[in-house]
Amino acid sequence: TPTSSGKSYSNRGMTLEEDINAANTYYVSRDMAIVHKKPTPVQIVNVDYPKRSAAVIKEAYFKQASTTDYNGVYKGYHVDFEAKETKNKTSFPLSNMHEHQITHMEQVMKQKGLSFIIVRFAPLGETFLLESKYLIDYWYKQQDGGRKSIPYSIVKEKAYLIPFHFQARVDYLKAVDKVLAKLEEDVNV
Amino acid sequence: TPTSSGKSYSNRGMTLEEDINAANTYYVSRDMAIVHKKPTPVQIVNVDYPKRSAAVIKEAYFKQASTTDYNGVYKGYHVDFEAKETKNKTSFPLSNMHEHQITHMEQVMKQKGLSFIIVRFAPLGETFLLESKYLIDYWYKQQDGGRKSIPYSIVKEKAYLIPFHFQARVDYLKAVDKVLAKLEEDVNV
Ligand SMILES: [Mg+2]
Ligand SMILES: [Mg+2]
């Protein structure tokens, strides 16, 4: 059933994070992978413990996250990624990324984890898995005065389109499988 | 320098979690592993945005965690663990564990992640890495009317003692290496 907003079936008002959470729930229910979103880090300052009811946090502050949004394990592979949605059609602006996320991605890669971003071009209704190595390349080029975004054409060339799946929504493991197939290929050359 | 409390050097007032956090900081500084503690999950209900200062969370509630405390990646291996401290000397009480943690451990094992607990017998000043398979074995035996704890002697037999390290405090990667060596051995038999 199409919605009144006229959005495509795969994109009717669900945010990328909601879609990924749905995928993770689906994957764990099928023993396909175990991936969780990290809770928002909060500095708790003051807690009330009323009798006969749940503790209430009365004062707390948002802390800077030191990692990416999601991580977990899939067929023995450590997977770690950040989800990013852009309203842009022609490029992915690097202003979407934070320095600490880049640092974390580099650390994960050093330990041979699979590090990537899931990027959605909202107006196009397209969602991609882009390996962090490409992102990091653009990140450092930008610091050397290079462009402030990754062109859509490059994403389309380097990244893997994530197919829509009725239950998993963004069926990103399909794209992870392509990354793994490529890794195997490179090893066997 | 020994402290007035007479505790041993390796255990002078630091909690197990503080020691593990120190280990993780040390490991990442040396590019040895990248492991983080998961933030406490909190349901945020009400946030104040004062002018010219940080947002203040005015009402929030603790949520049940759905995973274990720590996870990360080490030499391509996904590691996932829970830290538990007991005041007991003769056994590790299973009441320290929660059902959802056991479920999570099983899920991680199915995906070929390394799943374990780091258990400290505080009065003995000894800290062990115990693979989840042993813990889970006792967990289900308990549900069948078995004993409510894992004897210290079994922990000593099945688990790996974690050595103290001046900077890393609990140098648990040393114990992980033993788990990995055993895995290799089992494959090569
Ligand atoms: Mg994000
Ligand atoms: Mg714990």
Image (cartoon, coloured by chain):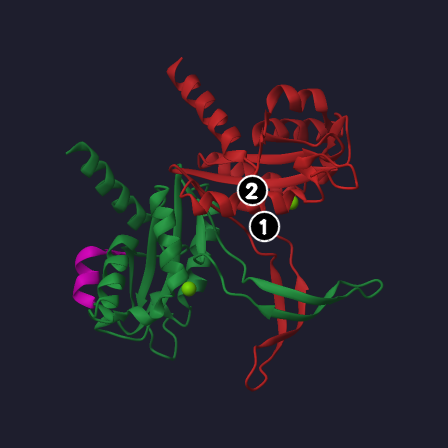
Chain colours: A green, B red
Q: Quadrant of the C terminus of chain B?
A: top left
Camera-nearest residue between B32 and A7: B32
Instruction: Please provide percent x and percent y for residue B88.
Output: 78, 32
**Which numbered tag is attached to residue B66?**
1
Q: Is the magenta stretch mostly helix, strand or loop?
A: helix
Does dot 1 land on a helix, a strand or a loop? loop
- Number of numbered discs present? 2
Does dot 2 land on a helix, a strand or a loop? helix
Camera-nearest residue between B72 and B13: B13
Q: Based on the picture, tell me whether residue A110 belongs to the magenta stretch.
A: no
Chain of the residue under label 1? B
Quick check: A117 above or below B15? below
Quarter where residue A20 is shown? bottom left
Q: Residues within 10 Å of mark 1 (few under 14, many from 20)?
A: few
Gap in angstroms between the C-alphas marked 2 and 1: 7 Å
> Which residue is most to the front?
B1
Q: Residue type at mark 2?
A: His
Instruction: Please provide percent x and percent y for residue B65.
Output: 61, 52
Q: What stretch is highlighted in magenta?
A: A151-161
Quarter where residue B55 is shown? bottom right
Quick check: B89 above or below A138? above
Q: Mark 2 points at which residue?
A: B104
What residue is rendered at 65% in x and 54% in y?
B64
Chain of the residue under label 2? B
* Label 2 vs 1, first from the N-terminus: 1
What residue is rendered at 66% in x and 68% in y?
B60
Label 2–label 1 contact, CB within 8 A: yes
Instruction: Please provide percent x and percent y for residue B25.
Output: 50, 48
> Which residue is most to the left?
A189
